[in-house]
Amino acid sequence: MPALSPIRFGSGGRSWRRAPFDVTASYPAFRIRVTHIPAGMREVIWRKVPEPVPTVRLDGSVDYETSDGEVRHVPAGSFVLVQDVHGKRYLSRHSSKAQTVIWIALPNGLDLSQT
């Protein structure tokens, strides 16, 4: 679906034009959780996630390491899809500051590769 972006005019008026990118249809979030990670939380070992989970890191940073050894640094303001659903476990190595993360559970059957 085409995205629309506003064009502002000096007189305060505004019009709409087609943006240079497309946006998918809207999908409902099944559940949203906010996690507050305390300052000083360093390394945490997690089991695999049951389904892909998009996360938004509002502050702080983390390095995620999957069971196959891949490491990904995620700074504040970043969005990442946590999806190590077939591995044995993953690690998260947190920055020394307190952090806030939003976890978004997607509806069953939503195939992100088709969006």
Image (cartoon, rainbow, N blue to C red):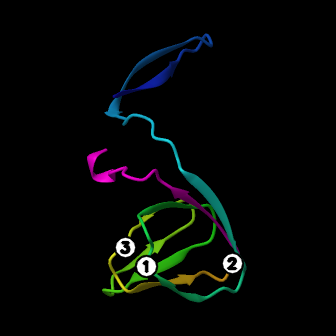
Residue at x 39% of width, y 34% of height = 25
Name the kind of residue labelled 3 in the image: Val
Q: Nearer the viewer, mark 2 or mark 1?
A: 1
Magenta span contains residue 105: yes
Q: Let me know if residue 80 is in the magenta part.
A: no
Q: Is residue 42 above or below residue 102?
A: below
Q: Tell me what residue is drawn at x 41 percent, y 83 percent.
A: 65
Quadrant location of residue 67? bottom left
On-image quarter of the C terminus: top left
Mark sitting on residue 97: 2
Counting residues from the start of the chain, the first of labels 2 and 3 encountered is: 3
Mark 2 → mark 1, Cα distance in angstroms: 25 Å
Which of labels 2 and 3 is toward the front? 3
Q: Is residue 1 left or right of residue 102?
A: left
Percent coordinates x, y for residue 83 in the rendering: 38, 68
Identify the residue under disc 1: 48
Q: Nearer the N terminus, badge 1 or badge 3? A: 1
Residue reaching furthest to the front? 108
Q: Are marks 2 and 1 in contact (CB under 8 Å)?
A: no
Mark 1 element type = loop
Q: Secondary structure at mark 2?
A: loop
Residue 77 x/y as whole percent: 56, 59
The quadrant in which the N terminus is found is top left
Residue 84 image-quadrant placement: bottom left
Please tell me how crowded label 3 is: few (under 14), some (14-19), or many (20+) other residues with Cα within 10 Å: some
Residue type at the position of mark 2: Lys
Q: Which residues are magenta?
A: 98-115
The answer to whether the residues at label 2 and label 3 have Cβ atoms under 8 Å apart is no
Residue, x 62% and y 13% (percent of image)?
Answer: 12
Residue under label 3, please give it: 85
Please give left or right for residue 37 compared with residue 62 in the image.
right
